[in-house]
Amino acid sequence: MIAPAVLLLATFLITPFLLSFWTAMTNQPLVPRPTPVRFVGLLNFQRVFSDPLFWTSLWNVTRFTIWVLPVQCGLAFLTALLLHQKLPMKNLLRGLFFLPAITSMVVVCVIWGTLFQYPSGPLNQIVGFLSGGAIQPIDWLGDPNWAMFSIVLLSAWQAYGFQMIIYLAGLQGIPDELYDAARIDGASALRRFWHVTMPGLRPTHVFVLVITTIQAFKLYTQVAILTQGGPKESTETVVHYMVRAGFEEQKLGYASAVSVILFVIVLLIALVQRKLLRRFDV
């Protein structure tokens, strides 16, 4: 019964992924050339590790991940707690909060690009109004100090609905009998939260953190549309670096080496996360 799905996955995902390992050890160009493709061994990997721009892009995407995890997961968790209560039109509110997650990232980038306009964009007008004019207009996408922070805000807003749905499913999976027993024992709302809700969501927290980390390291669309890696390489990411090497510079073998390195990095981070969370009895 699962043979068709396995065949499709093997054809379009697993096989190309395995071929990328071989491509990474050749000088394969994007467009075929008269000169034969040569096996270069680990040369592409050496070139990647010796390129300062690669390390800059790796630091940028790590910084993005560290920032977006608490913002995106925290917003999703708080929203799920709110929508888990007995509210009027609860199902409608769930759909509205989930709407950004099913909206195309390109559309989201265009909308937020308008909000980020300098110096008279809507966001700058709001900041100026709230501060009484004390804060000068911010060049959200043109200032190296603010560009990555702006990408974090955009990304967290667009994607938190996915984690919200997962948290809602986790909350609904906690038996009501546990809350009833806690109330009978005289536990306050705060104690019920810490001793019933949080332990019941431990597997959900693990899943959300790992999935969000993997998605964060794949940051590309926002950067490609809004900043193109700038200003001053402050938003250059590993995937954007890889795409430029493969499609703009026609270095398919080099880009494949970057993809292999990214895969190993994300795999190691995911494994370390799971081990650390298990150590804390999560």
Image (cartoon, grey):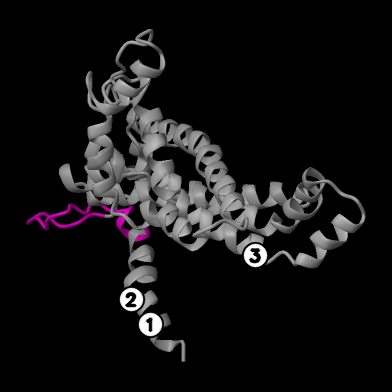
Whether residue 34 sits left or right of residue 254 in the image: it is left
Q: Which mark is residue 226?
A: none
- At mark 2, the secondary structure is helix
Instruction: Give residue 102's position: percent from left, percent from top.
Output: 35, 58
Query: Compared to 134, does 219 lie above or below?
Result: below
Report which residue position mark 1 lands on: 7
Instruction: Give residue 100's position: percent from left, percent from top.
Output: 37, 51
Q: Residue at x 29, y 49 (%)?
A: 105
Where does the magenta region start and end? Answer: 21-38
**Which is closer to the viewer, label 1 or label 3?**
3
Q: Residues within 10 Å of mark 3 (few under 14, many from 20)?
A: few
Q: Residue at x 41, y 43 (%)?
A: 157
- At mark 3, the secondary structure is helix
Is label 1 in contact with label 2 (beta carbons under 8 Å)?
Answer: yes
Query: Compared to 237, does 262 lie above or below?
Result: below
Report which residue position mark 2 lands on: 11
Give the residue at the far left of this rendering: 34
Please tell me which residue lies in front, 153 or 257: 153
Report which residue position mark 3 lands on: 172
Q: Residues within 10 Å of mark 2 (few under 14, many from 20)?
A: few
Q: CA distance from mark 1 to mark 2?
A: 6 Å
Query: Compared to 174, does 67 lie above or below?
Result: above
Q: Residue at x 30, y 41 (%)?
A: 222
Residue type of the residue flagged with mark 3: Gln
Q: Residues within 10 Å of mark 1 (few under 14, many from 20)?
A: few
